[in-house]
């Protein structure tokens, strides 16, 4: 027998690869007990010891594959290859080259801290997979027999790792399911599958080969996890007992493939290679590296060719390269993100596990989530009670509540199921006490209904028992005394309700002479049809308001659910999410699409119904391929593939341990309001980072262009290396105020994405404007000093340009804060005070006692008048360019 025949039932184990329909999504029939036994070469008495040993040696132990953990030193070395770290390293070398040892040591410290933080975060992520073992049993009760066909099997405890396909195991209350199994016998079995599906309600299981169950597509309504004959590793027994045969172990279980440690390597089974923030930083870093490598040779060659200067210009060239690069970028980024993360944790209970993730959260423009527990609560509520004529009839709800109450009391059930609880919540409890319950026939999957027998303690009614039957519409109608055309009409009435996304139960009654003989399912005949009770999912109380906030933030919500498409669409419509007919996609259509087709279709689809875990991962990947930054909210192991495929994985605090550990963001509650707060904080931080980059890079680029031009026009260096470094230090220190700035609310309405090409265009345009202002300053200096010719002219030129540079940089800080027009009335903020301090330094340092030490000298009054005119024209140009930029940005609908 081939390995694949023993490893698991086809369609039960395995994962899909990217670009192909997941195997588990293909409609198949769940094999019958006989087919399973034949396929696994086993029987109801289990395996012999020899068979078990042979299979264990061939297939391996039944353990969740442990992730390959890289050592911390290896992760540290790997982090050195990051382009942003390379920028810092180059800065350190440049600073050492000009003997700025203090700057070099600071930069070295930043490199070490950055690498330590990155390595530590990745090391914690590697270890998080150890949480899987907490969800897996350690021992199991298995039937094994000695060699020989006639030997009776014995039940004994064995380590779970020794289980093999074909073993027969026994399950009882509180047991963890040790592997993927197919039930052979079951009695009142219910399982907690929250770790797999995120659904808190126990799922009923049975071993019957029910034809309807066997033909349910595995991609529908939760797929395999809803098949009553199948139980999966990672679930636990809530009630009842069962005997089952092991169908898959180890890496072949759904538990293993769901979190990517199985054989499958489909999309979404691994963490994306680079997040949105990582990609942006890498792009910006490479731009800076190119400029840094290009600037010194240009300065050296130009001065050597036109001015005959040699290596004496090297310190100046290196200083220009330093002046181009924002040394404080890592400090400002860390400060912005840390402040945002701290506020989220303190005020909203949202934990951001890695600081760069906060920027990615702010860049999210598509949020994928399940319906249950997010848009809706994990419980149904009664929608309407309809009589046979389709009109509202409260009497139908009354009889449904009588059935639910007395079935609960007389069948000795531990608690009502979710539907009965919803009916009881909507009914008048006092009316239920008017009856005496005498018997109950509880619900079972074969009959698909439950019956309560009650007696009304009223004169003339003591000798009459009333049978109240509630359950599946078809099952109830079959037992009612109705003409065939009436049956067809009632089925149509129920179908129309179901198509509207409602759950439908039928209610019927019958009166029988009182008796002491037990009631049986045979008595459920000749019933009078009372009507239908429809139920819908209870909406989450904060969902509607949170969805409005997300819409204002420019975030599109996509619902990825295993539910019926009508149920999902109904919940969306109730919450005000428009769902057009072409905006709803089911799993069977997804299976027939290529990755490119799915990416195109996913952009305009709102609801994806009957999704398996593989479908969710494919959809998430498709949305990212289409250019979106995607967040995914999940809480079950089945959500792990999609959680990893997203740019930002989000999980509530009560999610499965492995999901919570693998998520980027952890919420105190599964509440969309918390996500909206996180997105707002991410955009706040991202907006400040983007503003800093725009201001510093455009100003620095303009200065570099002006320095290159001045170096070719003047007989001396336009600025001394020490002056370049001091000016750059003052500017960078002042711009740390951006970490404490509060952007205008308009900035928070669009995703904040650092796009390197857009940033390059921005800094090029505004940098050229800054260079023009610098060149105009040269003219002002020439007029003020009446032309160069004395030794004092060089110091005066350095002083004039030093002052102008700091003043223009202060203007840049104030005028390039996009979206601040509505916020100016709140008084000066930290950026305004920092810009004022920068201007004061520029004006007072040259004439101060420190000026001569730095090669600076006082300037004539006429220069300041000419400089004021240049600055006024520069401010007008900045405002005009900013207005044009904001108009184009609004047309594109992007933040930066």
Image (cartoon, rainbow, N blue to C red):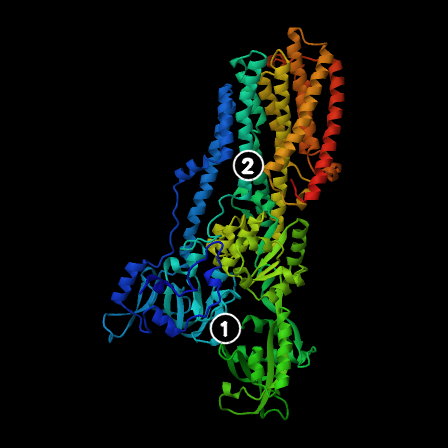
Residue 123 appears in the picture as rendered: yes
Residue 99's disc is none
Q: Are marks 2 and 1 in contact (CB under 8 Å)?
A: no
Q: Nearer the viewer, residue 842 or 761?
A: 761
Indicate whether 846 appears above or below 128: above
Q: Quadrant of residue 835?
A: top right
Write the residue at 58% across / 26% down. Answer: 324
Counting residues from the N terminus, which is met first, the one under dot 2 or under dot 1?
2
Residue, disc 2: 283
Badge number at residue 414: 1
Viewer-nearest residue: 432 or 166: 166
Q: Which image quarter holds the C terminus?
A: top right
Q: Secondary structure at mark 2?
A: helix
Give the image location of residue 216, x and y in percent.
50, 70
- Given residues 171 and 448, the one toward you in this image is 448
Measured from the top left, where is residue 355 in percent x and y? 54, 42
- Residue 860 to residue 361: above or below: above
Callout in the foreground (2, 1)? 2
Mark 1 Cα shell of 10 Å, populated few (<14), some (14-19), many (≥20): few
Q: Which quadrant holds the N terminus?
A: bottom left
Residue 542 is at least partly visible in this image: no
Rendering quarter of residue 601? bottom right
Dividing the picture into quadrants, the one containing residue 431 is bottom right
Q: Position of residue 722 (x, y in %)?
A: 57, 17
Q: CA distance from mark 2 to mark 1?
A: 59 Å
Residue farthest toward the top in the current orientation of the protein: 790
Does 435 sit left or right of 193 as displayed? right
């Amino acid at each position: 027998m081939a390995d694949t025949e023993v490893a698991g039932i086809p369609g039960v184990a395995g994962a899909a690869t990217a670009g192909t329909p997941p195997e588990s999504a293909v409609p198949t029939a769940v094999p019958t007990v006989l087919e399973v036994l034949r396929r696994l070469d086993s029987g109801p008495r289990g395996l012999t010891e020899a068979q078990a040993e042979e299979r264990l040696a061939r297939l391996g132990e039944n353990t969740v594959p442990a992730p390959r953990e890289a050592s911390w030193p290896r992760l540290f070395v790997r982090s050195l290859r990051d382009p942003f770290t390379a920028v810092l390293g180059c800065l350190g070398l440049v600073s050492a080259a000009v003997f700025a040892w203090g700057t070099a040591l600071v930069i070295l410290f930043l490199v070490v801290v950055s690498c330590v933080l990155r390595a530590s975060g990745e090391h914690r992520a590697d270890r998080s997979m150890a949480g899987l073992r907490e969800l897996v049993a350690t021992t199991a009760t298995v039937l094994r027999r000695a060699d020989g066909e006639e030997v009776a099997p014995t039940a004994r405890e064995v380590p779970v790792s020794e289980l093999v396909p074909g073993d027969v195991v026994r399950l009882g209350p509180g047991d963890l399911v040790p592997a993927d199994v197919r039930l052979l016998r079951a009695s009142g079995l219910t399982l907690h599958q929250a770790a797999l599906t995120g659904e808190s309600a126990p799922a009923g299981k049975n071993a019957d080969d029910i034809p309807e169950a066997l033909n349910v597509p595995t991609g529908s309504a939760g797929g395999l996890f809803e098949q009553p004959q199948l139980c999966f590793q990672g679930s636990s027994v809530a009630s009842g007992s069962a005997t089952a045969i092991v169908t898959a172990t180890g890496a072949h279980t759904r538990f293993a493939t769901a979190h990517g440690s199985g054989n499958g390597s489909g999309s979404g089974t691994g963490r994306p290679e680079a997040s949105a923030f990582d990609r942006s930083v890498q792009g910006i870093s490479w731009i800076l590296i190119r400029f840094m490598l290009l600037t010194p040779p240009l300065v050296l060659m130009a001065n050597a060719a036109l001015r005959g200067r040699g290596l004496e210009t090297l310190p100046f060239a290196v200083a220009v390269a330093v002046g181009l690069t924002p040394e404080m970028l890592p400090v400002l980024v860390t400060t912005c993100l840390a402040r945002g993360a701290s506020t989220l944790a303190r005020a909203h209970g949202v934990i951001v596990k890695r600081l760069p993730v906060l920027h990615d959260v702010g860049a999210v423009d598509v949020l994928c989530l399940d319906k249950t527990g997010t848009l809706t609560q994990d419980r149904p509520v009664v929608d309407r009670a309809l009589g046979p004529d389709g009109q509202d009839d409260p009497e139908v709800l009354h009889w449904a509540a009588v059935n639910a109450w007395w079935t609960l009391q007389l069948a000795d059930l531990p608690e009502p199921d979710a539907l009965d609880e919803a009916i009881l919540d909507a009914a008048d409890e006092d009316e239920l006490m008017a009856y005496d319950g005498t018997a109950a026939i509880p619900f079972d999957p074969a009959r698909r209904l439950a019956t309560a027998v009650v007696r009304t303690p009223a004169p003339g009614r003591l000798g009459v028992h009333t049978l109240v039957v509630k359950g599946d519409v078809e099952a109830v109608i079959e037992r009612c005394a109705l003409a065939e055309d009436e049956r067809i009409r009632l089925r149509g009435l129920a179908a129309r309700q179901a198509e509207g996304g409602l759950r439908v139960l039928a209610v019927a009654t019958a009166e029988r002479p009182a008796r002491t003989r037990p009631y049986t399912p045979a008595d459920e005949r000749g019933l009078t049809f009372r009507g239908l009770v429809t139920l819908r999912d209870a909406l989450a109380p904060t969902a509607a308001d949170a969805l409005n906030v997300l819409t204002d933030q420019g975030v599109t919500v996509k619902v990825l659910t295993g539910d019926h498409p009508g149920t999902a669409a109904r919940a969306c419509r109730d919450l005000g999410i428009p769902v057009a007919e072409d905006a709803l996609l089911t799993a069977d259509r997804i299976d027939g699409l290529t990755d490119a087709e799915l990416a195109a279709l996913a952009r305009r689809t709102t609801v994806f119904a009957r999704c398996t875990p593989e479908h969710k991962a494919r959809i998430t990947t498709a949305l990212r391929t289409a250019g979106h930054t995607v967040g995914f909210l999940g809480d079950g192991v089945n959500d792990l593939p999609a959680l990893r495929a997203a740019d930002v994985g989000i999980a509530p605090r009560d999610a499965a341990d492995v999901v919570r550990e693998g998520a980027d963001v952890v919420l105190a509650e599964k509440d969309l309001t918390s996500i909206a707060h996180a997105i707002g904080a991410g955009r706040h931080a991202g907006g400040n980072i983007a503003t800093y980059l725009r201001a510093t890079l455009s100003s620095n680029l303009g200065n570099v262009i002006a320095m290159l031009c001045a170096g070719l026009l003047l007989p001396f260096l336009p600025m001394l290396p020490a002056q370049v470094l001091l000016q750059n230090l003052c500017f960078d220190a002042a711009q740390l105020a951006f970490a404490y700035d509060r952007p205008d609310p308009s900035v928070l309405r669009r995703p904040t994405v650092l796009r390197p090409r857009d940033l390059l265009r921005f800094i090029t345009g505004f940098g050229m404007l800054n260079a023009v202002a610098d060149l105009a300053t040269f003219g002002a200096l020439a007029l003020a000093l009446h032309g160069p010719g004395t030794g004092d002219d060089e110091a005066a030129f350095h002083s004039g340009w030093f002052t102008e540079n700091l003043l223009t940089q202060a203007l840049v800080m104030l005028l390039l804060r996009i979206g601040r027009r509505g916020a100016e009335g709140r008084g000066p903020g930290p950026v305004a005070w920092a810009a004022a301090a920068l201007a004061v330094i520029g004006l007072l340092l040259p004439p101060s006692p420190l000026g001569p030490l730095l090669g600076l000298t006082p300037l004539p009054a006429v220069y300041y008048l000419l400089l004021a005119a240049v600055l006024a024209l520069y401010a007008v140009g900045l405002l005009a360019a900013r207005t044009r930029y904001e108009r184009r940005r609004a047309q594109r609908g992007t933040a930066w």
